[in-house]
Image (spheres, grey):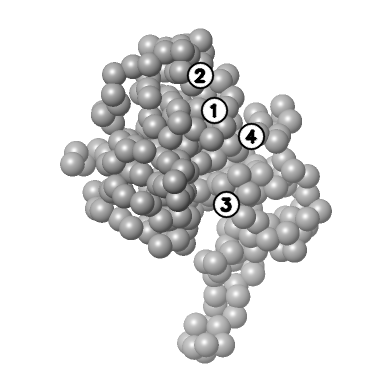
């Protein structure tokens, strides 16, 4: 396996009883590359992400991450390995404020010599939160507000800031702007551009053709649980992509090559 490959799947398959949601998905993502995953509803996009991140257990196939075969038992395993994911559900704790959400599950502590009686280092987490928001360009007027008091756009930006704030080897965003307005969408897209400038690879699941053509290097198209196209952005257009999504156009069997 080439050392410039961050993620590879071989024959990745997921069946729900008799329903074949994902079939024989071969995929490669290289260092610094931004790749979009597109397809109609039910095409297998989110299923693919769930297998990579350990949200669900695959029926068959292999996932190789950072040069090693992996079999994550859950999203925490994937995160500890270096995969940060923004799911459509956001996975935020509504009753907690921004710092508590950014550090949920990885809280900073002090007085560690007290053993099981360690104290949370709120001051450090608040400062790191402010630094993270500044670094990602996210504007939150008051980080002490609980998530339940924020707009949908602010919630989405908190989830994305949490993902982008920690040193990771791969970022995955599943429809990050689906429910956002124009200004909020622009803010999220700026975060994605910042990740690109920093050389961090990214998988973007999106229905937004304009967004995809603006932000990524390659487009992978899913149809009926299979990868049917691997297109470089500069060699395709919206009409071509739609033809693959709808099945009006079919190509040679996808082998996962970049």
Q: Is disc 4 placed on a helix, strand or loop?
A: loop
State whether residue 56 is above or below residue 40.
below
Name the residue located 40 percent from the left edge and 46 percent from the top edge.
14
Choose mark 1 or mark 4, whichever is in front. 1
Residue bearing the label numbered 1: 40
Image coordinates of residue 53 in percent, x first then y, are 43, 52
Between the residue at mark 1 and the residue at mark 3, the CA separation in whole angstroms equals: 28 Å
State the image coordinates of residue 17 (x, y, percent, origin top left): 45, 50
| Horizontal side, residue 50 vs residue 3: left or right | right
Which quarter shows the C terminus? top left
Q: Which residue is mark 4?
A: 177
Q: Earlier in the sequence, mark 1 or mark 4?
A: 1
Q: In what element is the residue under mark 1?
A: loop
Q: Nearer the viewer, residue 44 or 187?
A: 44
Q: Nearer the viewer, residue 136 or 221?
A: 221
For the residues carrying marks 1 and 3, which lies nearer the camera in this image?
1
């Amino acid at each position: 396996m080439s050392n410039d490959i961050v993620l590879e799947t071989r024959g990745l398959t997921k069946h729900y009883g008799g329903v074949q949601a994902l079939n024989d998905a071969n995929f490669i993502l290289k260092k610094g590359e931004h790749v979009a995953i597109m397809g109609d509803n039910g095409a297998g996009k989110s299923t693919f992400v769930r297998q990579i991140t350990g949200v669900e257990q695959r029926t068959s196939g292999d996932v190789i991450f950072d040069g090693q075969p992996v079999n994550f038992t859950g999203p925490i395993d994937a995160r500890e390995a270096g995969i940060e994911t923004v799911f459509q559900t956001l996975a935020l704790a509504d009753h907690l404020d921004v710092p508590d959400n950014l550090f949920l599950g990885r809280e900073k502590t002090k007085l560690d010599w007290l053993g099981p009686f360690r104290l949370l280092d709120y001051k450090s987490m608040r400062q790191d939160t402010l630094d993270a928001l500044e670094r990602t360009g996210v504007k939150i007027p008051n980080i002490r507000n609980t998530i339940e008091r924020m707009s949908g756009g602010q919630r989405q930006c908190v989830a994305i800031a949490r993902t982008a704030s920690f040193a990771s080897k791969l970022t995955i965003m599943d429809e990050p702007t689906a429910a956002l307005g124009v200004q909020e969408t622009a803010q999220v897209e700026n975060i994605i551009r910042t990740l690109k400038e920093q050389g961090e690879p990214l998988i973007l699941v999106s229905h937004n053709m304009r967004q995809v053509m603006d932000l990524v290097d390659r487009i992978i198209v899913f149809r009926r649980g299979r990868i049917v196209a691997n297109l470089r952005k500069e060699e395709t257009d919206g009409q071509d992509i739609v033809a693959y999504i709808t099945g009006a156009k079919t190509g040679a069997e996808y082998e996962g090559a970049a």
